[in-house]
């Protein structure tokens, strides 16, 4: 009888909990301009601890021959589906979930991907030298459709008379014109797209534009900056990396200051080329890590550095480096399973919150220690005093940041700080990790990629975890010293990838389709500082869509391609050879949030030469050139 009462109470309580979850309302489906993708949005009265499950079937709602299937879960009240086939009608509904309980379905919406019918017109014009008025041969004219227009990105070149002609879809366009050894500009004499004159093409138009004049590029004046690096007595030379951070002009990487550098010779001397008018903060990082790094002249941060204004050759910029202090301190503890009976083999990472050591990017570099394979014990020693956050990971278990009460969290903001002083060992830093749910045996597919900071630098020790369509964490990974992460053994299905690390904002990518037909999936993660003060960094939403010049360029064998999105967009980024053949797809119709993003391009399998990289969104397309030089 007692058992029956317990079962009845459980049933009643479960029904009560379920009844409290209201279904989402006002589900709508909105297609993009070309109907190649659909955005679902809905309303929901509850906001705390709720996640949303998206269901789809490849048929109208009243077609009973096909069933709905769950394709994703998301935390926001929106979802973009770009897995659509022309001519097919799709049906969707959404449920809300708290823990293991789900609400009743929302209303059902239908969406049909139709193929739009376009009409065309022509744009004609001439490109001339601004000084001589002579025609410029082989100039490139890019016709860029304005946001929310139906036009397509078009590139044409001028002939020997400087003439160009382009057949385009009727729409609004902004033109960008460039040529070798000339300064590119937007039509009409605009330096940026927001000031460009919009060209409107109507059906059967044959527009002739005013002549476009380009100014020749004036090569920069180059000077040298030189000096030496020694110890504090000025006697013993030190081999060091020297980096010049240019603070008065923007150049790649776009997030932060432009920079270039060199390395001292065996006598501690260095020399590097700088431009006339550059304002430089110079940074020395010794290869002997027992010595401190510093900015010139003896400054700890880039904001305090004495600036060097280049108006001629600059000499005598010398560094005298001080040794690092040795501290008799440390952090120690054990990584257990959740029952505290089994010591786990894994890794523990420490990140200093109040960073004082000079660092040009202000990155919180992680230090790590492996746990003992039998006991799970770990220890760190000789730590710079300050506040630290700890992260533990072990194969087959959910990673967690440290909390003194033994509870678990995968959000670094909820972690407890560990106070390290100049003397003494901080002990009992113990973790109690829960086993994660392993994916079912199957195709054994992988989700992998790289983690980058907005400056272009890799970020190691990033916690990434993969959740299935039911919200269960099925894999966890920590990025290695070159920023790479990997999740293996995944089965067919839709997944969410989440990445977070200390002092950076969390990144979540939902609706990742993994199946045996398409194979392994590669996704690079762009991390943005989470409200930290960095060298020129910020996490504001860009004002305009932009594709930046790759860095470095020329490159061998890899380079970073960076772009900015003023609003959430579906992005395609591909690389072509000079005859227009596609050689690599870096991003294929993937949803990206507004902000700054970057992708690493590895060209180790390609031959030397010039390549084009092209980015496309729903309303904008840009192509740029890069050079592979092995």
Image (cartoon, helix red, strand yellow):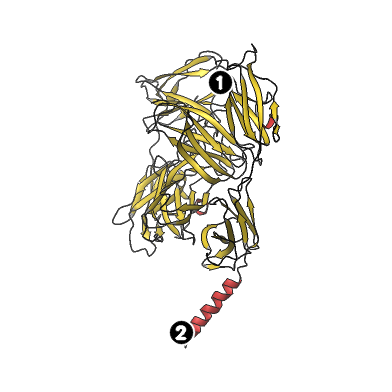
Q: Decide: is 523 above or below 237.
A: below
Residue drawn at the location 60% of the way across and 64% of the way down:
61
Name the outermost residue toward the top: 132
Q: Is residue 113 visible?
A: yes
* Quadrant housing residue 323: top left
Q: Earlier in the sequence, mark 1 or mark 2?
A: 2
Name the outermost residue toward the bottom: 1
x then y, percent, for residue 210: 70, 22
x then y, percent, for residue 168: 63, 34
Q: Decide: is 539 above or below 496.
A: above
x then y, percent, for residue 621: 58, 36
Q: Decide: is 336 above or below 285.
A: below
User: Residue tagged by mark 1?
Assistant: 138
* Quadrant housing residue 45: bottom right
* Quadrant housing residue 556: top left
Quadrant location of the C terminus?
top left
Relative side of 89 to 424, left or right: right
Considering depth in this image, is 387 or 145 the residue closer to the camera?
Answer: 145
In space, the residues marked 1 and 2 are separated at their CA atoms by 85 Å
Mark 2: few/some/many CA within 10 Å (<14, 14-19, 20+): few
Q: Secondary structure at mark 1?
A: loop
Q: Secondary structure at mark 2?
A: helix
User: Residue tagged by mark 2?
Assistant: 3
Q: Which mark is residue 342?
A: none
Mark 1: few/some/many CA within 10 Å (<14, 14-19, 20+): some
Considering depth in this image, is 97 or 368 the residue closer to the camera?
Answer: 97
Name the outermost residue toward the left: 374
Q: Is residue 427 visible?
A: no
Which mark is in front, 1 or 2?
A: 1
């Amino acid at each position: 009888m007692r058992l029956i009462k317990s079962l009845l109470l459980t049933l009643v309580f479960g029904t009560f909990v379920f009844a409290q979850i209201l279904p989402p309302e006002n589900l709508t489906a909105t297609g993009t301009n070309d109907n190649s993708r659909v955005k679902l949005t809905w309303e929901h009265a509850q906001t705390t601890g709720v996640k949303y499950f998206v269901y789809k079937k490849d048929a109208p709602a009243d077609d009973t021959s096909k069933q709905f299937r769950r394709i994703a879960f998301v935390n926001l009240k929106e979802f973009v589906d770009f897995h659509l086939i022309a001519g097919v009608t799709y049906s969707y509904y959404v449920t809300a979930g708290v823990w293991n309980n789900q609400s009743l379905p929302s209303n059902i919406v239908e969406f049909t991907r139709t193929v739009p019918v376009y009409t065309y017109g022509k744009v004609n014009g001439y490109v001339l030298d601004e000084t001589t008025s002579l025609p410029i041969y082989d100039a490139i004219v890019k016709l860029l459709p304005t946001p929310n227009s139906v036009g397509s990105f078009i590139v044409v070149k001028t002939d020997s008379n400087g003439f160009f002609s382009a057949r385009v879809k009727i729409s609004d366009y902004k033109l960008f014109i460039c040529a070798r050894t000339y300064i590119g500009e937007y039509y009409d004499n605009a330096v940026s797209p927001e000031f460009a004159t919009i060209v409107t093409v109507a059906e059967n138009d044959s527009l002739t534009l005013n002549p476009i004049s380009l100014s020749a590029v004036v090569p920069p004046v180059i000077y040298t900056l030189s000096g030496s690096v020694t110890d504090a007595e000025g006697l013993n030379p030190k081999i060091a990396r020297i980096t010049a951070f240019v603070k008065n002009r923007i150049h790649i990487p776009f997030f932060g200051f432009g920079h270039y550098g060199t390395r001292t010779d065996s006598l501690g001397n260095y020399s590097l080329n700088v431009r006339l008018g550059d304002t430089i903060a110079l940074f020395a990082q010794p290869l002997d890590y027992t010595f401190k790094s510093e900015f010139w002249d003896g400054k700890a941060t880039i904001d305090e550095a004495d600036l060097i204004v280049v108006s001629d050759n600059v000499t005598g910029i010398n560094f005298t480096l001080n040794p690092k202090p040795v501290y008799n301190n440390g952090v120690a503890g054990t990584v257990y399973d959740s029952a505290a009976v089994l010591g786990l083999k894994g890794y523990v990472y420490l990140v200093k919150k109040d960073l004082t050591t000079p660092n040009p990017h202000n990155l919180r570099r992680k230090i790590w220690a492996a746990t003992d394979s039998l006991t799970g014990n770990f220890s760190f020693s000789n730590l710079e005093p300050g506040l630290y956050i700890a992260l533990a990971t072990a194969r087959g278990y959910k990673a967690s940041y440290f909390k003194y009460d033994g509870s678990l969290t995968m959000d670094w903001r909820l972690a407890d700080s560990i106070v390290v002083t100049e003397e003494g060992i901080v002990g009992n830093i113990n973790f109690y990790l829960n086993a994660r749910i392993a994916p079912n045996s199957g195709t054994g597919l992988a989700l992998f990629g790289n983690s980058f900071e907005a400056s272009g630098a890799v970020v190691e020790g990033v916690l990434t975890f993969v959740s299935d369509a039911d919200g269960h964490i099925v894999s966890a990974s920590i990025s290695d010293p070159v920023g790479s992460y990997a999740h293996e053994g995944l089965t067919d299905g839709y997944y969410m990838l989440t990445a977070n690390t200390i002092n950076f904002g969390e990144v979540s990518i939902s609706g990742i389709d993994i199946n045996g037909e398409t194979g392994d999936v590669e996704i690079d993660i762009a991390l943005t500082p989470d409200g930290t003060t960095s060298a020129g960094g910020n996490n504001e939403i860009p004002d305009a869509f932009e594709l930046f010049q790759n860095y470095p360029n020329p490159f061998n064998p890899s380079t970073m391609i960076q772009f900015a999105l003023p609003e959430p967009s579906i992005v395609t980024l591909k690389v072509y050879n000079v005859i227009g053949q596609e050689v690599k797809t870096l991003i294929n119709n993937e949803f990206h949030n507004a902000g700054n993003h970057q992708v690493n391009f590895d060209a180790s399998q390609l031959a030397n030469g010039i390549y084009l990289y092209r980015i496309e969104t729903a309303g904008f397309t840009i192509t740029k050139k890069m050079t592979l030089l092995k």
